[in-house]
Structures are given as C-alpha cells and as structure tokens.
Image (cartoon, helix red, strand yellow):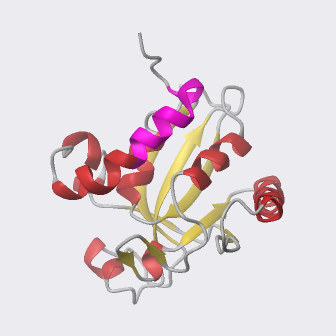
Amino acid sequence: MNTNYETITLAGGCFWCLEAVFDEMKGVLSVDSGYSNGHVANPSYRDVCTGMTGHAEVVQLKFDPAIISFRDVLNVFFAIHDPTTLNRQGADAGTQYRSGIYYHTPEQKAVAENLISELNAQRIWNSPIVTEVEALNDFYVAEDYHQEYFARNQNQPYCQAVVAPKVAKFRKRYLELLKKQPV
C-alpha cells in the first residue's frame, strides 16, 4: 500500500452517507466510520446517539494527495452535506450530527479555513457555514456493523431515502473523481 498518504477526519451528519461517497472517490485509500472530538473514552454508538459524549459521527479518510488534493476532498465534503445547519443534517439532529473538519496538520487547518472563507464569500448557501475546524482530539472506530453500511444495506429504507441520493449527487457532479469510470 502507498505510504505517501494524508489522513483527515470529517463530520457531516450520519457517517454512513460520508463513507458511501468517499468509498467511491479516486485517490481515497480507506474510509473508517467512527466517533471524534468528544470527552468520553471508547464510546459506543448507543452512547454517541445520546448526544452526551460530545462526539461527532465522522469518517476518517486516508487519501493519496498525488491523486486527489485535500481541497478536492473538502469540495466534495461541502457538496454532499449542508454545512450551514448547526448540529443537524436533515432529520438527524444533535451534536453528534454536526459539521466538522478535524484536521491532522496545520496545513489542513489553513486550507479548510481558506476554503470556508471563499465559500462564504461566494454565498453559495443562504446562511453562513457553521462547520467547525478543530484539531483532531480523538478517533474511535465505530462498531463493525457500521463499516461499509451502505454497501451492505442498500435496500434499507434510510439508505434508499438519505444515503443513495447523496451518492447519486456525487456521481453526477464529480464524475471525474470516481474510482470506476462509467463505460
């Protein structure tokens, strides 16, 4: 496996949505669903769902910057969730569904803050971006049944109603970033 990779941890609502999109993105080497930036050690999904642990549902990506830039990763991130709603994505509400970029390097922090400033200046959304940009404090891998959830449960109602449209939006808008090009 390529050892020239970067790692970033992103929160944008339910981790199943983010994982399903980033799994299909060229240059992404791995995607792990999990929990970050809370105040309880080794939280379970049930714990995080209470909103009392302080954790966000996240995905941690390893990507090859020679294939996909960090800025492109963030452009997709901002396109597939609403970064203007505080602690909410659609019907999913609570601090665990907040929008966040948990950077691993000072360079990632700078790129994220600059991009947010640019997007706010462009007024793409009717409200300002509320995505928090913080250093990664912790990351706990979610339970096995959350990994590759969409790939294994595409007919589940939440996956059909919420995850599948986000994957379709990514495929349509970012065709050139797909791992597998359509024939």
- Percent position (x, y) of residue 15? 40, 59
The residue under the point 69% across, 57% down is 104
- Residue at 71 percent of width and 37 percent of height: 69
Prevailing secondary structure of the magenta residues: helix
The furthest residue to the front? 126
Q: Residue at x 42, y 48 (%)?
A: 166
Residue 46: image quadrant is bottom left
Q: Quadrant of residue 180?
A: top left
Rendering coords of residue 86 (x, y %):
55, 80
The reply to whether residue 2 is in sight is yes
- Identify the image quadrant of the C terminus: top left
First to last magenta residue range: 166-178
Q: On the rendered structure, is 157 left or right of 102?
A: left
36 left or right, relative to 146: right
Compared to residue 167, the image places residue 176 above or below, namely above
> Where 131 falls versus 34 (above or below)?
below
Which residue is at 72% across, 27% downward? 66
Where is residue 124 drawn, in percent x and y?
A: 70, 59
Q: Nearer the viewer, residue 52 or 93?
A: 93
Task: Judge whether residue 177 is colored magenta.
Answer: yes
Question: x%, y% of residue 105?
Answer: 76, 56
Residue 103 located left or right of residue 80:
right
- Looking at this view, name the residue that lies furthest to the bottom: 52
Please tell me whether residue 139 belongs to the stretch shown in magenta: no
